[in-house]
Amino acid sequence: MPSSMSEKVLNDMLAFARSIAAQRGRNAEWLEDAIRNSVSVTAEEAFKLNVIDLVADDQPALLKKLNGWEIQHKGRPITLHTAGFEERTILPGWQHSILRVISNPNLAYILLMIGLAGLYFELSNPGAILPGVVGGISLILALYAMQTLPVNYAGFLIILLAVVFFIVEIKVSSHGMLSLAGVLCLVLGSIMLFRLPEQPMQLALSVFIPTVLVISIFFITVASLAFRAQIKRSQTGTEAMVGMQGEVRQTLDPEGKVFVNGELWNAVAEEQIMAGERAEVVEVHNLKLKVKKIGGR
């Protein structure tokens, strides 16, 4: 920051420290020196310098020393009675144990990516079930973990936008532009996800880079396969016969019979095709084929 602003911040901190020292009866000179010169001392030295009230080796010793101690609370004195207290350890419940494990930002990020990938696969291939179940559970765990993490929700929304781009890629032939936009949003959202103005970036690069690469390849592959499946010509039923070739068994003038795909079909043509010649199916209507002469119009 500019030197003038830095000096202003320093003076404000010094004034605050002096007011606390006067209120608590502390060593104002040492506090000022600590702020100006960043000096530090041990616990015993701090006690001798009148910076702290007391030093205790452990919690039982602290409770013993605090018995009869008088403190000020909301302007009135209160005497502490800590003698004879029973020390009990309260263990965290299973909910807190789970939260402690998954609240690691790296694990929460991986769970989020698995959740989005699983739901995306289920939406692009309805009926798979398992990817949707795994994705839903992973996404819920990730959102649960994010309650305790400094999440930047702008980054989270950008990641969701990336998934939207990949889904649209299934329906629209964008020649890879939507997939590229999805990968870009996935990278930007991941960088922003656990980064707030007052917090350093907590997502490890060793987790971030491989995860983004794997998930991007997964999304692009699934989108490509789903799009190809949609535009692929039907392989069953009468529609599958369009484009097949066969032999004319009864002269088409304009109607006759054609042997196609192991069956004899009634057929019609716009030109005369003699028996024994080859013809190609161009249309199927009411179990009658419309054909054209191979090499003809």
Image: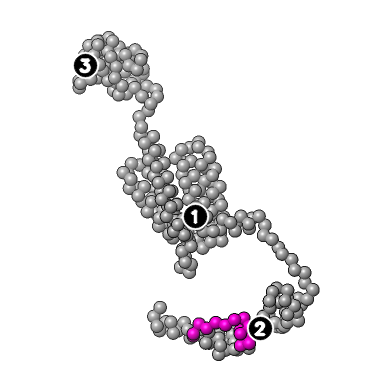
* Mark 2, residue position: 53
Foreground mark, 2 or 3?
2
**Viewer-side residue, 287 vs 274:** 274
The answer to whether residue 28 is above or below residue 74 is below
Judging from the image, what secondary structure is the residue with disc 3 in? Answer: loop
Side of 71 relative to 181 (left or right): right
Number of marks in picture:
3
Q: Which residues are magenta?
A: 36-50
Residue at the outermost right position: 84
Side of 174 relative to 272 (left or right): right
Q: Earlier in the sequence, mark 1 or mark 3?
A: 1
Q: Residues within 10 Å of mark 1 (few under 14, many from 20)?
A: many
Are the residues at dot 1 and dot 3 in contact (C-beta closer than 8 Å)?
Answer: no
Q: Is residue 94 magenta?
A: no
Q: Residue at x 52, y 87 (%)?
A: 33
Identify which amino acid the numbered label 1 is placed on: Tyr
The answer to whether residue 122 is above or below residue 274 is below
Identify which amino acid the numbered label 3 is placed on: Glu
Judging from the image, what secondary structure is the residue with disc 2 in? Answer: loop
Foreground mark, 1 or 3?
1
Marks 2 and 3, how far apart at CA: 109 Å
| Horizontal and vertical percent position of residue 56 | 68, 78
* Mark 3, residue position: 271
* Mark 1, residue position: 109
Marks 2 and 1, how far apart at CA: 44 Å
